[in-house]
Amino acid sequence: MAEAARIPYRTTGSTLLHPLSDFLGIPLDQVNFVACQLFALLAAFWFRLYLSPSHASSAVRHAFATIFGVYFAVFCFGWYSIHIFMLVMISYSILNVASIPNIHRYSFMVAMGYLTLCHISRIYIFHYGILTTDFSGPLMIVIQKITTLAFQVHDGIGRKAEELTAEQNLLAIKTRPSLLEYLSYQLNFLSIIAGPCSNFKDYIAFIEGRHVQMKLSEVSWKQKGHDGLPDPSPVGAVLRKLSITLVSLLLFLTLTKNFPATYLVDNQFISKSSFWSRLGFLYVAMQASKPKYYFAWTLADAVNNAAGYGFSGVDKTGNFHWDLLSNLNIRNIEMATSFKMYVENWNIQTTAWLKRVCYDRAPQYPTALTFLLSAVWHGVYPGYYFTFVTGIFMTLAARAVRNNFRHFFVSPKPLKTGYDIVTWLVTQLSVCYTVAPFVLLAVEPTIKLYKSLYFHMHILCVLVLLVLPIRSQKHLKRQQLPIQGTHNSDINEKAK
């Protein structure tokens, strides 16, 4: 396995930083990734200050963002980056040639088909190993952008406004983008390496200098004592996010190496440890696997903010927020008291993409189809399918328990606190149990792990689904309708 892991470093990406890689003892692909993101951070500050909409035209900003994005892709992934460029051009052709009623279908099938072929080829290229930052990562983000844009163009040109949900109507695109706009949206240096995916309308508004003003215009500043619109700075948000990336990096370099997931399937560990010890180490090992995601996603968020992109608005107390493109909410993840809460705060932009292209449009079984799409999008390693199929049962079982029992524990406060503690513990352990195959990847270690844990979560989920109704209609009518009404009214206000 170690031999296979060294092969890609001689064949992908630039070797300029190879001496630094050897000196630090860190794989070259990771060094290239961090170097590109740090350079992108500096370029983003320069982009905001010297290529702002007041200093440069939209065309210049689009061209600069695209050229730098292409360079970063080539620097990190070498000739493998051609897969990204080819798919972008193929998808642009589909966007302009395909009929409007089918534009989203063709774009989706071609993009996902191409991605799947690339995922299959990676098994042979990397000998079943997996790089931290190989070309599939940016390709997966591009897939999100291609399909998101195709569906939004279809909504804007091919469907009537009354056929759309409030959110779809808000994001619908009435005209096809130009080639420069399309390339900039897909390949810009802010998101080419680690994302995240954003909506086309938001990105174009950012390039044209309308992004922040659009969010600020939703607030009545005269009532707050301001004569005009303020000019929020992203510097504070960037510094805060960089501090998170630094802590995440330190945790990755220490915690992750000391608690490897492979120890979960070590024969000696399984034979000598108790069930509770194995379950406890599972939690620790899965916690140790998070910092690399915290690092990559938070740094990517900071890069976008440094360029002035990602402003999400103002809260009731007047504080500015730069989390439009945030991919995670660490506090909500670590304190999640339900499977749903955990999923909604992890890889947020991917969750939004899955909702917009699958969950909201699926005629039947939206939960199952969404989890299956997520598995296919991630790749062809068996561990992904173990994780997302298990996730289907976890989601349905958690929903059934919550809908049938939560209303009994709303008050008094000590009862609710006790309920929250129990649901937090169950949620964290169930998530660790679910995502372990995602880390282990292969069939044999996954089955070995689940056997050592007696498939207890699978059995519990099946029992819950057999005994409890998935929906408690009486509770849903009393609890969910007001929440849905509030959510829809908020979206409608934005649409206005």
Image (tube, rainbow, N blue to C red):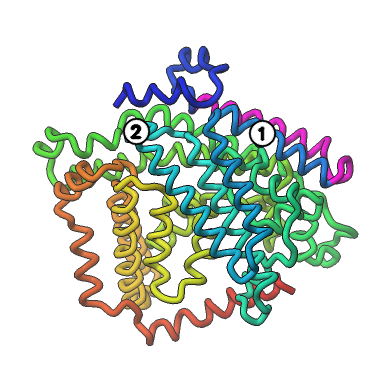
Question: In which quadrant of the rendered image does the C terminus lie?
Answer: bottom right
**Residue at point 76% right, 43% down?**
62
Where's residue 417, x and y in %? Answer: 37, 64
Q: In the picture provided, is 377 more to the left or to the right than 437?
A: right
The residue that disc 2 covers is 129
Q: Where is residue 383 in the image (x, y as percent from the top left)?
A: 30, 47
Looking at marks 1 and 2 on the same chain, the residue that comes earlier in the sequence is marked by 1
In the rendering, which numbered label is found on residue 384? Answer: none
Q: In which quarter of the image is residue 151?
A: bottom right
Residue 35 is covered by the magenta coloring: yes
Spatial separation of the CA atoms under disc 1 and disc 2: 30 Å
Q: Tell me if residue 425 comes above or below residue 37 in the rendering.
A: below
What residue is shown with label 1?
41
Residue 440, quarter of picture: top left
Q: Does the magenta stretch include residue 352?
A: no
Which residue occupies the foreground of this view, 97 or 170?
97
Other-residue count near label 2 (Cα within 10 Å), few / some / many at <14 / 14–19 / ≥20: some
Q: Which of 143 and 408 is in front in this view?
A: 143
Question: Magenta residues, as a range?
Answer: 30-57
Residue that appears at 33% across and 42% down: 439
- Give 474 or 59, whichever is nearer the viewer: 59
